[in-house]
Image (cartoon, helix red, strand yellow):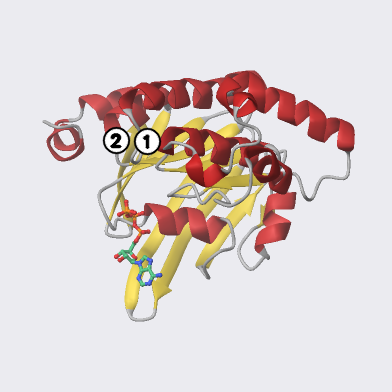
């Protein structure tokens, strides 16, 4: 078997006296969609932030055979690891076009930037319609599309999405999840999806890890986890 694209071992993070991650380990092969599920405060966001270089962590995390931990966030982005943060964090006062341009600020290849923009518009046609609109006036779902589009402008090989369904109208959730699958299938981008909506996450992923209080308590193929009685009771609405 080829080595995983991302291999995380014994990841530990503390915020002062609060221990958020107590030794999280998982692997993701190139081309997979893997999901991390878990309740409030389980450590999902912290895991993504540690991999993106946004919080200090101990343990090891290797991306394409090279270490991530201790690297500055901009270098991690440049290596092809994209992150769509929880709450979307678009630049509210900038237009849709300007937000997308921010996502491409490391890219000197203007032709590729134009190509990437067209691909983002193919995934989310609404963004083209709203190019001159300030991002803060978009709906929650449209802001999520923009946040994903902005991350795609950075040419990721690996994309981490933090709660893309949070606070979004059900109709747009479906669209966004269809496009997450398209990003994986059509563009070959490996995906790590963090979700509280476990049903949805297990539907689109091939494998899953369940986090509880900073530890992995269960993992396996998504169809198996969907049928697991313990998971059903806790995360899948019985
Ligand atoms: P949620 O789905 O509610 O966002 P999560 O699984 O993403 O939860 P994290 O946000 O990673 O969980 O939080 C893990 C733990 O770390 C929680 O106990 C949380 O209160 C704590 N924590 C997170 N960020 C900070 C911070 N900046 N300072 C102190 N504690 C924090």
Residue hosting label 2:
197
Which callout, 2 or 1, points to the residue nearer the camera? 1
| Residue situated in front as seen by the camera: 186 or 165 | 165
Residue hosting label 1:
165
The residue shown at (54%, 51%) is 92
The residue shown at (33%, 40%) is 167
Question: Which is nearer the N-term, disc 2 or disc 1?
Answer: 1
Ligand 1 quarter of the rendering? bottom left
- Give x and y (percent) for residue 154: 71, 42
The residue shown at (38%, 80%) is 16
Label 2 with label 1: CB-CB less than 8 Å: yes
Please identify the quadrant where the C terminus is shown. top left
Q: Is mark 2 within 8 Å of ligand 1?
A: no
- Give x and y (percent) for residue 195: 36, 40
The residue shown at (55%, 64%) is 54
Q: Is residue 117 left or right of residue 167?
A: right
């Amino acid at each position: 078997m080829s080595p995983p694209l991302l291999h995380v071992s014994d990841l530990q993070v503390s915020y002062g006296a609060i221990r958020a991650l107590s030794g999280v380990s998982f692997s993701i092969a190139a081309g997979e969609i893997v999901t991390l599920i878990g309740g409030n405060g389980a450590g999902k966001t912290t895991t993504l932030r540690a991999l993106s270089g946004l919080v200090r962590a101990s343990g090891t995390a290797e991306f394409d055979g090279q270490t991530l931990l201790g690297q500055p966030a901009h270098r991690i982005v440049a290596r092809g690891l994209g992150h769509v943060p929880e709450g979307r964090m678009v630049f509210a006062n900038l237009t849709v076009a300007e937000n997308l341009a921010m996502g491409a600020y490391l890219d000197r290849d203007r032709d590729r930037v134009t190509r990437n923009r067209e691909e983002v518009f193919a995934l989310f046609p609404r963004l083209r319609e709203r190019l001159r609109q300030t991002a803060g006036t978009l709906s929650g779902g449209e802001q999520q599309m923009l946040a994903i589009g902005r991350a795609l402008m950075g040419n990721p090989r690996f994309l981490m999405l933090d709660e893309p369904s949070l606070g979004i109208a059900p109709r747009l959730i479906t669209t966004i999840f269809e496009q997450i699958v398209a990003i994986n299938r059509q563009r070959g981008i490996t995906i790590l999806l963090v979700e509280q909506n476990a049903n949805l996450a297990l539907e689109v992923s091939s494998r899953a890890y369940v986090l509880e209080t900073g530890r992995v308590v269960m993992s396996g193929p998504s169809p198996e986890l969907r049928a697991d009685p313990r998971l059903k009771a806790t995360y899948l609405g019985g």
